[in-house]
Image: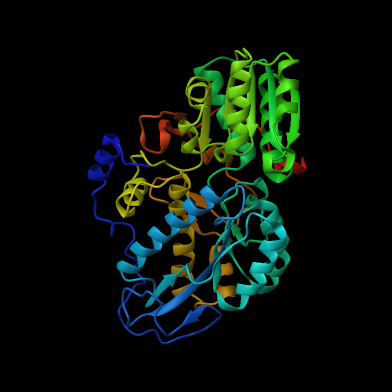
Amino acid sequence: MAITRVGRRLFRGAAVPLVLGLILAAGCSSQPDRNSGPGVTSAPCPHAVHKDKGCIYLGVLSDLGGGPYAILGNALQDGQLAFWREVNKSGGIDGYEIDISTYARDTAYDAGKHTEEYSDIENHILALSMSLGTAQTLAVLPRMDAANMITAAATLWSGWQYRDVDLNLVFDGSYSYCTEAMLALDWFARNHYQPENIAIVAYRGNYGGDYANGVIKWATENGAKVTTRIDTGPNSEVGSQSRAIAEILTRPTDLVMLSTGPAETAEIVATLAAAGYTGRFLGSAPTWNGALMQTAAARPLAELYNYTSPVDGWDGSSVGARHARAAAAHEPNNWGYNLGWAVSYTMKDVIAAAASGQGLNRASLRHALENLTVDSEGMAATITYGGAGPNLANQFAVINAPDADMPLGSRTLVPEYRGSTLNRVKLSAPCAML
């Protein structure tokens, strides 16, 4: 996608010192003197900035081309690559640079392939910088536990926010799919209308189940009804969303909540709009892809649909978003670039804490994650890991609207929306389990 006039202004406005917030106190130029675990070597990284530094290898298990989230997976990888490139240019961590390319594997968003690729790289990495997919990550979690293997999660399943579920191995974003739905509905009720009859179209499994339960909890707290809940799958699996569309048209519905993929979202919104549906649509972060503004669904999406995201976007004004823009070689093709950048702060802080504490090994990283507070330079809510559960009062959502004239086809409406419902609900376990 070509960079628009707005995009060029964003790039010029983003020309701030990248070293701010990225230079690590633990960085040094001396030859590292320890090699204390898998994935830590005294030899430089294959594409080292500084040849006198050692290398920390982090693995990546993501949809990098073969599955339904390939666009998102590649954007996530680009954001992480840009982040670590700036860290390495700024001196690395404790005499080491970071490599996330050598052991990056395409899992095609398939749990079986995810497990195979994990087996292939486990003995060569210090940690996973990304494990994309809730079911996929759960499939290897027992082995990760045995190996003290921590990872970032691009998924927002609420289970990652409970230590008895993720075993203090998976660091998540600022909210879950469950609380994302509640934040989105609070914003919607305040800025559009109070929904009375809500329909949910959700993927089967942890993603859709988490989001759907968040919608149900919001409705219970706010006097609305969920009149229709439709469990579905990707079009590659179910063919089309015709069943969901037909069911919505036969029920009284004034708002459709979506936790699907972008292709399914475009089909549902465009078909219902063409059929005369007069309600609106709210979508979870994975429902959006800027490329949808180049399709026949562009107009109904712009008129009837909003989506939420967990991090400050490409047009964001936070320090972190400005750093992410300035580090990009070109405009990314998906909002996942910013998410990839934002989740990397935690790994950076974990490695730095381990290096200054018990050393660079997996057990040390796992220990360092406990009670670690991470500030992503304003891209997401500050988060402390290792508690009994999420800090609901601290969570916020970024509210977005499709806009064909903006970079990535979207503009930020509200950078930090905090609603009232999270102050009232009580969550003691993953939403899909309640």
Q: Residue placed at 51% from the left, 50% from the top?
A: 383
Rendering coords of residue 112 (x, y %): 72, 61
Rendering coords of residue 382 (x, y %): 47, 48
Q: Looking at the image, what colour scheme do you see?
A: rainbow
Rendering coords of residue 218 (x, y %): 66, 27
Q: Residue placed at 62% from the left, 52% from the top?
A: 67
Count numbered badges in the picture.
0
Picture quarter containing residue 208? top right
Check the image and report above or below for 376 versus 177.
Answer: below
Residue 140 shown left or right of residue 28 in the figure: right
| Position of the N terminus by quadrant | top left
Q: Nearer the viewer, residue 368 or 335?
A: 335
Check the image and report above or below for 229 versus 84.
Answer: above
Check the image and report above or below for 89 versus 226.
Answer: below
| Position of the C terminus by quadrant | top right
Is residue 226 at all visible to an observer of this figure? no
Q: Nearer the viewer, residue 425 or 327?
A: 327
Residue located farthest toward the bottom when viewing the structure as drawn: 33
Q: Residue placed at 32% from the left, 71% from the top?
A: 91
Rendering coords of residue 102 (x, y %): 49, 72
Residue 228 shown left or right of residue 301 in the figure: right
Is residue 250 at all visible to an observer of this figure? yes
Q: Residue placed at 39% from the left, 59% from the top?
A: 83
Check the image and report above or below for 291 versus 82.
Answer: above
Residue 213 shown left or right of residue 349 in the figure: right
Picture quarter containing residue 137? bottom right
